[in-house]
Image (cartoon, rainbow, N blue to C red):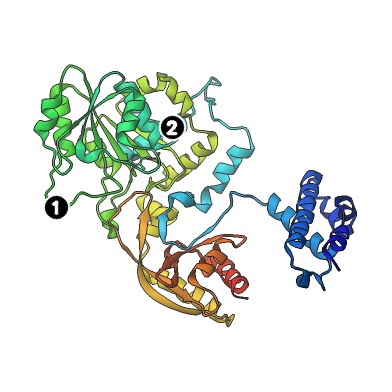
Amino acid sequence: MNKGKLLSTLPSVDELLNHEDLLNILKRIPRKVVVEQTRESIQRERNKLLNMKDEQLENYRIEENKLIQSTIGACEEFMSMNLKEVVNGTGVVLHTNLGRALLSDEIKEAVWSVASGYSTLEINVGTGKRGSRYSHVVEIIKNITGAEDALVVNNNAAAVLLVLGTMAKNKEVIVSRGELVEIGGSFRIPEVMEQSGAKLVDVGATNKTHLRDYENAIGEDTAVLLKVHTSNYKILGFTDEVTLEEMVELGKRTKVPVVEDLGSGVLVNLQKYGLTYEPTVQDSVKAGVDIITFSGDKLLGGPQAGIIIGSKKWIEKMKKNPLTRAFRVDKLTMAALEATLKYYLDEEEAIKKLPTLRMITETIEPIHQRAVALLNIILKENLDVDIKIKDDYSQVGGGSLPLEKLPTKVLQLTSSKLSVNQLEEGLRLNKTPIITRIQGDKLIIDLRTIKERDFPIICDALKKVLS
Ligand SMILES: *Cc1c(COP(=O)(O)O)cnc(C)c1O
């Protein structure tokens, strides 16, 4: 058939829409979507025909059934959630692009009941009067950290902005040149400072800052001595920094409050579990820092949030700042945060039950067992893939413990049929996307961040990609 004739046999949108299969999906997919996807399927077929050479056209027929099936597929794809679960095979535990910390399964009910029903968010049931949304977590934060008061905002970036905007607007903030951190995206200490209305006074040198550098910079306009935890990098070699204790002593002597941006905000001493020491929130409180800020979804292992703790006098002032309203956390975050924090009343429980802490402290044996189990499931399928268990290292991620190398077990895959890039892409485009790493010409799946319930997903995806 020639091109003109073939084009004239293309069905119309109305013709296709009358087909039984499409009428059927109209029962569960909005008409608007089905019409649009039908139109697009026809357009794709038209474009395909227009691009065909004469010899290809010769035996070509338009198959209406194929058009209908591809329309149904497209409708389902359109209706499926765009924000959905993925399998994290990267071994990066706090993967910012994959949503950072995972909440524990056990707090589902706490979050869902508040999400789907009315709640005590801002009512004091004791008095019947209006309550504070922060009250649900303040006591437990005080209990765990030893701080005098607490406030929660949307994330740690907002926390730093609120703190500086409240304590140092139109005044000076002294910070070491070694701590002018960029956290990724556009969070840079000098820029946050500017946005808050505070004036940055940087002192010392990149590798060395002495107490006298801070001391000499203190003047009439000094409002805050700021310490920023350089969470995502380490300066090694000929270095010197002022300890928190020294800074607090200087602050007390000169009556300038000390603020610390702790970044990750870990609540347990990870050294006990074989990791590098990461300054804990409790240590900063003990040192006497006036105000401390940290994230909810890094090493704390909770929902996205920025937690501010410290002196009641300053926190009261922050609550009156209109930014607090703008940075307000919602009830889902509050529920998830309260439920997560409860685990910390028993440290062993926190390590066992919070996915982030469990994954970063997990020993090599259970990871190896999962590697063997997944390997065996895949081998049973007799796929055209070469697969081995190898030693490797996972990362904590999220700008936390940047030098920590966690020994792990990975599956290393190669296929004679597909290039490593094709393999990686195939798994990534799976219905439940599987995110992996490429190392040279090998595909790497790190078992540290893989759960048993991911096994069938990985196996089915490999079957599809390799068939
Ligand atoms: C991660 C980090 C931030 C930003 O925290 P978010 O919760 O991601 O907004 C700020 N400061 C430091 C030192 C950090 O490590």
Q: Within 10 angstroms of label 1, few (less than 14), some, or many (20 or more) residues?
A: few
Residue 143 in picture, x, y percent from top left: 35, 37
**Given the image, on which type of amino acid does mark 1 rest?**
Gly
Q: Is residue 249 left or right of residue 459?
A: left
- Dot 1 falls on a residue whose secondary structure is loop
Residue 258 in picture, x, y percent from top left: 23, 29
The residue at which mark 2 appears reads as 153
Q: How many marks?
A: 2
Residue at image location 53% in from the left, 53% down from the top:
105
Q: Is residue 42 left or right of residue 272?
A: right
Q: Which mark is residue 283?
A: none
Residue 379 sits in quarter: bottom right
Residue 91 in picture, x, y percent from top left: 41, 61
Q: Quadrant of ligand 1?
A: top left
Look at the picture and state if 368 lies above or below 231: below
Q: Which mark is residue 237?
A: 1
Residue at image location 51% in from the left, 66% down from the top:
424
Look at the picture and state if 412 lies above or below 27: below
Pick whichever, 283 or 432, lies toward us: 432
Q: Nearer the viewer, mark 2 or mark 1?
A: 1
Residue at image location 77% in from the left, 56% down from the top:
41
- Dot 2 falls on a residue whose secondary structure is strand
Pick whichever, 236 or 273, lies toward us: 236
**Given the image, on which type of amino acid does mark 2 rest?**
Val
Q: Is residue 124 left or right of residue 178?
A: right
Quadrant, the N terminus: bottom right
Residue 249 in picture, x, y percent from top left: 14, 30
- Counting residues from the N terminus, which is met first, the one under dot 2 or under dot 1? 2
